[in-house]
């Protein structure tokens, strides 16, 4: 059994491992032209770096999910809180007060870290709450992990979205390999735009 609480905090993120919502305003890059929207959550910056790259490559809009109570900077404390939330199914409350209409978007990219071999709790909560809005859309997810893969991500996303959602293949990357895998990620992004 892997003890994720013992992994170094930040796990290769540019930030110090703290919840990126704690000190910075959430990213709201919303235009009237983009046909792709990236909806993502990132606690320590790895997924945020991927979201930024994806947005640059595809000229996509970005909406960062924020939790009302940010996760602690301490890695072990975050793991403990996430475990408690998952076991009690008390998912974190999101602030979605400025969530945009999805009408203009043809492709939605969902970005999230892997927590306990499944999408991080805030993404789970987002889909439980808003998944119906993804009806009839093409949706693909990208995730970052600490070396153990995307777990059941694809299955969970399918369960939390309507049958009419066209779920495209997930892309996941080991957090410490982010910098050397940008080409592979760019190739995946291009494919998601083309796959109908
Ligand atoms: C609460 C928690 C649980 C985690 N569980 C896993 C896991 O099950 N498998 C894994 O490979 N990495 C796991 N990790 C590591 C993160 O997925 C990885 O560091 C990721 O890149 C963090 O993304 P972020 O910087 O965007 O928050 C976990 C991290 C945290 C904070």
Image (cartoon, grey):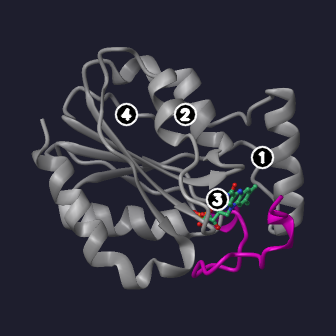
Q: Secondary structure at mark 2?
A: loop
Question: Ligand 1: does it lie within 8 Å of the C-beta at label 4?
Answer: no
Calculate the distance from the C-alpha at mark 4 to the C-alpha at mark 2. Answer: 9 Å
Quadrant in which the C terminus appears: top left
Q: Badge 1 is on which residue?
A: 69
The furthest residue to the bottom: 180
Which residue is drawn at the image coordinates 74% and 32% (left, top)? 91
Which residue is drawn at the image coordinates 36% and 14% (left, top)? 163
Q: Earlier in the sequence, mark 1 or mark 2?
A: 1
How crowded is the residue under tag 3: few (<14 C-alpha within 10 Å), some, or many (20+)?
A: many
Can residue 106 be spotted in the picture? yes
Q: Badge 2 is on which residue?
A: 96
Which residue is drawn at the image coordinates 22% and 35% (left, top)? 105
Calculate the distance from the C-alpha at mark 4 to the C-alpha at mark 1. Answer: 22 Å
Percent x, y for residue 135? 32, 18
Q: Badge 4 is on which residue?
A: 100
Q: Are marks 4 and 1 in contact (CB under 8 Å)?
A: no
Q: Which residues are magenta?
A: 1-23
Calculate the distance from the C-alpha at mark 1 to the C-alpha at mark 2. Answer: 13 Å
């Amino acid at each position: 059994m892997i003890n994720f609480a013992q992994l170094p905090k930040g796990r290769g993120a540019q930030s110090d491992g703290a919840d990126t919502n704690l000190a910075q305003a959430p990213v709201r890059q919303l235009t009237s032209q983009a046909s792709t929207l990236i909806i993502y959550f990132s606690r320590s910056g790895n997924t945020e770096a991927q979201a930024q790259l994806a947005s640059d490559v595809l000229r996509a809009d970005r909406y960062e999910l924020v939790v009302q109570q940010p996760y602690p900077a301490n890695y072990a404390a975050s793991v403990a809180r996430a475990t408690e939330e998952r076991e009690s199914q008390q998912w974190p409350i999101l602030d979605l007060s400025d969530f945009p209409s999805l009408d203009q978007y043809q492709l939605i990219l969902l970005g999230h870290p892997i927590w306990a071999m499944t999408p991080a709790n805030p993404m789970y909560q987002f889909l439980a709450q808003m998944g119906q809005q993804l009806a009839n859309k093409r949706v693909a997810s990208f995730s970052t992990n600490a070396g153990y893969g995307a777990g059941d991500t694809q299955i969970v996303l399918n369960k939390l979205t309507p049958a009419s959602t066209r779920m495209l293949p997930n892309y996941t990357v080991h957090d410490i390999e982010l910098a050397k895998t940008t080409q592979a990620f760019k190739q995946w992004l291009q494919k998601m735009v083309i796959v109908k």
